């Protein structure tokens, strides 16, 4: 993205978003027609399977296209649609658009087909497509429906400056503001750094709305390294800022840490997530919920290694980690958990670890929970835990 375009985006981000409400796009509605009787659907499916799929829908008149789009065999219909979309040009898309709109009016369109079409259309003729969609479905006084974002996410990579100029030409208000999420999603596909900088140019109170589009693309495009770089950029920009800016750091940390946990779990090294989160333990953006998730993930994979590492942590971090770890392990292997804990009654972390086991037993075996409560060294903790036993 060139400097001029990025500067324009940052300026508009910073000023335009203050004029209306931002709304994260909601999931697209389910296609209509699901209330038809199952026998009727089965009969149509079997009848249609006897007919070979058309190689292409072709750019015919809307009525013919509407009939082609109604093929009840989704694999045949979708194959024909893919072929048609590969032939889409600025000169031939409108009949197919008209066919989709007619089926939408009848409540008979397939939402997945419609989204595929809009994505293809954004890359082929984004400006005219958006102008037409605004005419047919837009209300400049309200936030836009998700349909507009499907076009933006392919139009922006195809022609960033044209998409930005069109957006800038819209009157200020909730419709224009609501399109920034889709614009940002498209920008992240081709220039992730510019998208991140664009978000940081927005007033801090609005930045959280863009995580919906930005976070998945950061990790899809650059993996854990990109996620860490993004987090560091956010921290450096906002760490000493307003309360809203600091809240933005907490939001991004929660998002990044969740994805770090998932990535390390998939790689078979969940203990790395625990170590990664330790480096943020003393920071105001540290998130207890994702810390517990990281610990639980490590314990499920290798309890001995996880607990050996947790035993080396400072007392405050160790206490919460042991509680989460033992509760998780007890749910998976109660005898092994009890054996491990019984051998550590003289350790300084015993009460914290035993509390995790008691939390598990209170729900599954109250008499056993009472026996472990009696082993706690802290009288106040014993009394508090006894009150929780049913």
Image (cartoon, helix red, strand yellow):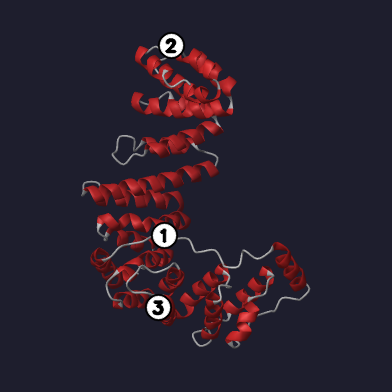
Mark 3 / mark 1, whichever is N-terminal: 3
Q: Tell me residue 351's x, y (percent).
A: 41, 17
Residue topped by disc 3: 134
- How far is disc 3 from disc 1 in space, using C-alphas? 22 Å
Q: Looking at the image, which is closer to me, 193 or 13?
A: 13
The residue located at (47%, 42%) in the rendering is 261
Residue 298 vs 252, above or below: the answer is above
Mark 2 / mark 1, whichever is N-terminal: 1
* Mark 1 residue crowding within 10 angstroms, few (<14) / some (14–19) / many (20+): some
Q: Tell me residue 61's x, y (percent).
A: 59, 88
Residue topped by disc 2: 346
Asked whether, in this view, residue 17 is left or right of residue 266, the answer is: left
Q: Looking at the image, which is closer to me, 203 or 51?
A: 51
Q: Does dot 1 land on a helix, a strand or a loop? A: helix
Residues tagged 2 and 1 counted as in contact (Cβ below 8 A): no
Q: Quadrant of the N terminus?
A: bottom left
- How far is disc 2 from disc 1 in space, using C-alphas? 50 Å
Q: Does dot 3 land on a helix, a strand or a loop? A: helix
Camera-near label (3 vs 1) is 3
Residue 3 vs 343, above or below: the answer is below
Say if residue 65 shows up in the picture: yes
**Based on the displayed image, in which of its 4 quarters is residue 116 positioned?**
bottom right
Q: Does dot 2 land on a helix, a strand or a loop? A: loop
Q: Tell me residue 235's x, y (percent).
A: 29, 48
Camera-near label (3 vs 2) is 3
Mark 3 / mark 2, whichever is N-terminal: 3
Residue topped by disc 1: 213
The residue located at (39%, 11%) in the rendering is 377
Residues tagged 3 and 2 counted as in contact (Cβ below 8 A): no
């Amino acid at each position: 993205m060139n400097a001029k375009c990025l500067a324009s985006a940052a300026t508009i981000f910073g000023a335009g978003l203050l004029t209306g409400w931002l709304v994260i796009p909601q999931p697209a509605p389910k296609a209509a027609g699901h209330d038809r009787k199952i026998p009727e659907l089965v009969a149509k499916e079997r009848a249609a399977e006897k007919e070979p799929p058309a190689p292409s829908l072709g750019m015919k008149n809307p009525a013919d296209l509407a009939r082609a789009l109604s093929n009840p065999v989704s694999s045949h219909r979708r194959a024909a649609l893919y072929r048609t979309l590969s032939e889409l040009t600025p000169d031939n898309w409108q009949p197919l658009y008209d066919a989709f709109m007619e089926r939408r009016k009848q409540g008979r369109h397939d939402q997945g087909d419609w989204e595929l079409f809009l994505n293809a259309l954004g890359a082929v003729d984004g400006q005219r497509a958006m102008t037409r969609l605004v005419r047919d479905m837009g209300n400049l006084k309200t936030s836009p429906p998700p349909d507009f974002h499907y076009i933006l996410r392919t139009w922006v990579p195809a022609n960033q400056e044209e998409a930005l100029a069109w957006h800038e030409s819209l009157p200020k208000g909730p419709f224009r503001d609501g399109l920034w999420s889709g614009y940002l999603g498209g920008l992240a596909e081709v220039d992730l750094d510019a998208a991140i900088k664009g978000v940081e140019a927005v007033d801090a109170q609005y930045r959280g709305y863009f995580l919906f589009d930005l976070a998945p693309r950061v990790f899809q495009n650059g993996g854990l390294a990109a996620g860490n770089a993004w987090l560091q950029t956010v921290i450096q920009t906002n760490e000493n800022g307003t309360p809203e800016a600091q809240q933005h750091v907490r939001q991004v940390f929660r998002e990044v840490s969740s994805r770090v946990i998932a990535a390390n779990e998939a790689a078979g090294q969940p203990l790395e997530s625990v170590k990664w989160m330790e480096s943020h333990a003393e920071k105001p953006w540290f998130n207890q919920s994702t810390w517990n998730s990281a610990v639980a993930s490590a314990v499920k994979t290798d309890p001995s290694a996880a607990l050996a590492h947790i035993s080396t942590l400072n007392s405050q971090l160790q206490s919460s980690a042991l509680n989460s770890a033992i509760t998780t392990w007890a749910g998976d292997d109660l005898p092994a958990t009890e054996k491990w804990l019984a051998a550590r009654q003289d350790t300084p972390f015993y009460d914290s670890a035993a509390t995790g086991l008691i939390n598990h037993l209170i729900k599954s075996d109250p008499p056993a929970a009472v026996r472990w409560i009696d082993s706690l060294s802290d009288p106040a903790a014993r009394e508090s835990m006894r009150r929780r036993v049913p």
